[in-house]
Image (cartoon, helix red, strand yellow):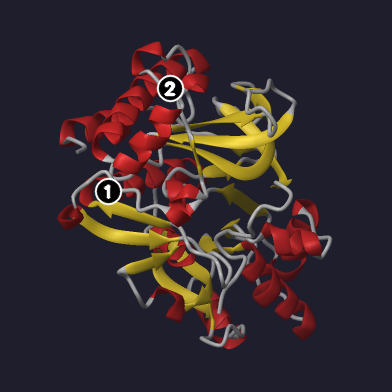
């Protein structure tokens, strides 16, 4: 179990200013501790890692950390704490007919998720809570005990806002009158907007275009993620998404983020240069999809995600089904240190999944 002293120590890490060498040493030590913890506490995880002939004392670099496929969370109950310590069960938004991932959180892991997410977000939107407009309907957050990824995202990001308002009615239609009343109430203030990418596209941008309306949100900051598959199927890339959002809302501060329910809190934010960034508490490794060897900067492969957050379940090292490429380390023009990268899509024939690829 995560001790309070260890929690406090993790939170002292600087978000985006450590050198790669300093960060790797801290991460390696913590990842080794987490691997040992989960091998001892979670029998299915122990079984997988043992078959990989892993020996903790042999760790030399982050590429030596054993990983499990993200699909395993759909088929195994992976928990490293007793049943009575689980306070939340988070669920991925799988398509109908597929098993969702189930992620089991104890009190300390849930707290760590929130505190680290707050530090990452603070670097992009500041420490002050802003009036917040959620591009979704209020019905999405009614069940606080069985979290979907979409529910968890809304509730998690809502802590950065105040006077939270929902832009959509429960039938997912845009309530323009309610949105305009909210904007008039907070005229002249910075506004934080949050939503999942495809929902923003379908139920805000496209809706406003059909109505030939433009919302006065020049002071808005939009945070969005998930649902890119549907947009790419419509031949809408990140640049067009930003252009169309700007044309219908006047927003020019738009930040995509990458993350998954299996590592909630450990998000990768898009900087002003359009690059996704790892924080002090996370990193990625790109692996060859055929032999799973680590690939160098500039080569595309499967993304392995590392995070120090998961203590109540073995989610600290996951091999995703997403394809990406590391662009650089410590030298992004935005000034943030750490690994920065881009997402190129999904592995062919991978199960469709994600925060907002399906909703009702």
Residue on which the image places disc 2:
53
Q: Quadrant of residue 242?
A: bottom right
Q: Quadrant of residue 94?
A: bottom right
Residue 316 in view: yes
Quadrant in the picture for residue 249: bottom right
How much space separates mark 2 and mark 1, taking CA atoms?
33 Å
**Residue drawn at (15%, 56%) of the image:** 84
The residue drawn where x is 71% and y is 59% is 229
Q: Secondary structure at mark 1?
A: helix
Disc number placed over residue 219 in the picture, else none: none
Tell me the crowding category of disc 2: few under 14, some 14 to 19, or many 20 or more residues within 10 angstroms, Cα based: few
Tell me the SS state at disc 2. loop
Label 2 or label 1, whichever comes before in sequence order: 2
The residue singled out by tag 1 in the image is: 111
The residue at 52%/50% (across/down) is: 71
Q: Is residue 216 above or below residue 354?
A: below
Question: In this rendering, does residue 246 appear at all?
Answer: no
Q: Is residue 62 above or below residue 133?
A: above
Point out residue 97 in the picture as x, y percentages from the top left corner.
56, 71
State the residue at coordinates (51%, 46%): 70
Pointers 2 and 1 in contact (CB under 8 A)?
A: no
Q: Is residue 7 left or right of residue 357?
A: left
Q: Position of residue 25 (x, y in %)?
A: 41, 15
Looking at this view, is 304 or 275 the one in front?
A: 304
């Amino acid at each position: 179990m995560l001790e309070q002293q260890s929690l406090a120590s993790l939170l002292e890490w600087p978000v985006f200013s450590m050198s790669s060498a300093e960060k790797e040493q801290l991460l390696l030590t913590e990842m080794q501790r987490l691997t040992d913890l989960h091998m001892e506490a979670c029998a299915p995880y122990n079984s997988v890692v043992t078959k990989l002939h892993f020996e903790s004392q042999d760790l030399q670099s982050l590429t030596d950390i054993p990983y499990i496929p993200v699909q395993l969370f759909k088929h195994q109950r992976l928990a490293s704490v007793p049943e009575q310590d689980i306070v939340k069960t988070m669920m991925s938004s799988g398509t109908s007919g597929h098993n969702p991932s189930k992620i089991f959180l104890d009190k300390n892991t849930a707290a760590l998720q929130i505190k680290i997410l707050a530090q990452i977000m603070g670097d992009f939107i500041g420490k002050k809570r802003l009036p917040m407009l959620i591009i979704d309907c209020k019905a999405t957050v009614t069940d606080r005990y069985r979290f979907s990824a979409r529910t968890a995202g809304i509730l998690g990001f809502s802590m950065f806002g105040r006077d939270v308002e929902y832009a959509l009615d429960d039938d997912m239609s845009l309530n323009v009158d309610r949105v305009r009343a909210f904007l008039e109430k907070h005229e002249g203030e910075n506004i934080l907007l949050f939503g999942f990418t495809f929902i923003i596209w379908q139920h805000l941008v496209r809706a406003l275009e059909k109505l030939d309306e433009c919302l006065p949100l020049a002071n808005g900051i939009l945070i969005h993620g998930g649902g890119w598959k549907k947009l790419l199927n419509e031949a809408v890339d990140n640049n067009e998404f930003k252009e169309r959002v700007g044309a219908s809302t006047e927003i020019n501060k738009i930040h995509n983020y990458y993350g998954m329910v299996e590592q909630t809190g450990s998000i990768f934010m898009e900087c002003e240069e359009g690059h996704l960034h790892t924080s002090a508490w996370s990193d990625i490794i790109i692996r060859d999809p055929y032999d799973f060897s680590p690939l160098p900067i500039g080569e595309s492969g499967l993304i392995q995600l590392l995070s120090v957050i998961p203590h109540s379940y073995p989610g600290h090292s996951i091999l995703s089904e997403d394809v990406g490429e590391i662009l650089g380390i410590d030298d992004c023009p935005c000034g943030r240190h750490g690994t920065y990268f881009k997402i190129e899509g999904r592995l062919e024939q991978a199960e469709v999944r994600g925060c907002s690829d399906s909703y009702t």
